[in-house]
Amino acid sequence: GHVLYHRARNPPMVAGAAACWSHRTLDEVAEVYRNMPRGYNGHERGKCEDRAEASEEMTTSKCLEQYLNVSAEPMLEDGKREYVTVDPYGNMLTWNRTEQGEWWYWLNKPADRGQMEHCCASRPM
């Protein structure tokens, strides 16, 4: 999965609509989910567990990394254009790091990543 940069320590992968897994990975992670600990009521603590208010990015990333040795890495086209978009393509084309500043999307993202018309791969997911 693609890196979600705004979480500085152990950045998770984008696990929402752009998640694409092999059949084998899906089978194996399903078993992890069936057996994962449940019921913790505190805040995020970097564990593969089912808990109230958990985000799919953090939980999915931690479980895949811990049990299947799968971690996030940038999915880039030549020229540092990203294949995975976190908003509709038309919106992404308006995101300007220089003018808008370091809001959550740009936080911890490498400075050489494209913005506006250079943001996204020619065939994004």
Image (cartoon, grey):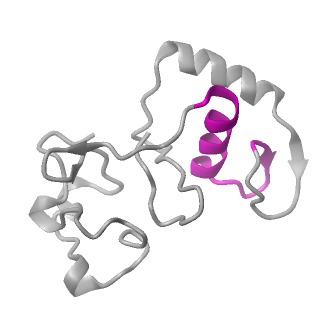
The number of callouts visible is 0
**The C terminus: image quadrant:** top left
Looking at the image, which residue is at 20% across and 76% down? Answer: 96
Q: Position of residue 37 (x, y in %)?
A: 86, 38
Looking at the image, which residue is at 59% across and 43% down? Answer: 61
The residue closer to the viewer here, 6 or 111, is 111
Q: Position of residue 73 (x, y in %)?
A: 42, 44
Residue 21 left/right relative to 41: left
Looking at the image, which residue is at 22% across and 65% down? Answer: 112
| Stretch in magenta | 48-69
**Magenta span contains residue 102:** no
Residue 91 left/right relative to 110: left
Looking at the image, which residue is at 42% across and 69% down? Answer: 108
Residue 123 left/right relative to 23: left
Relative to 21, is 117 above or below? below
Q: Position of residue 19 (x, y in %)?
A: 44, 36
**The N terminus: image quadrant:** top left
**Magenta span contains residue 60:** yes
Q: Position of residue 65 (x, y in %)?
A: 62, 37
Residue 111 left/right relative to 54: left
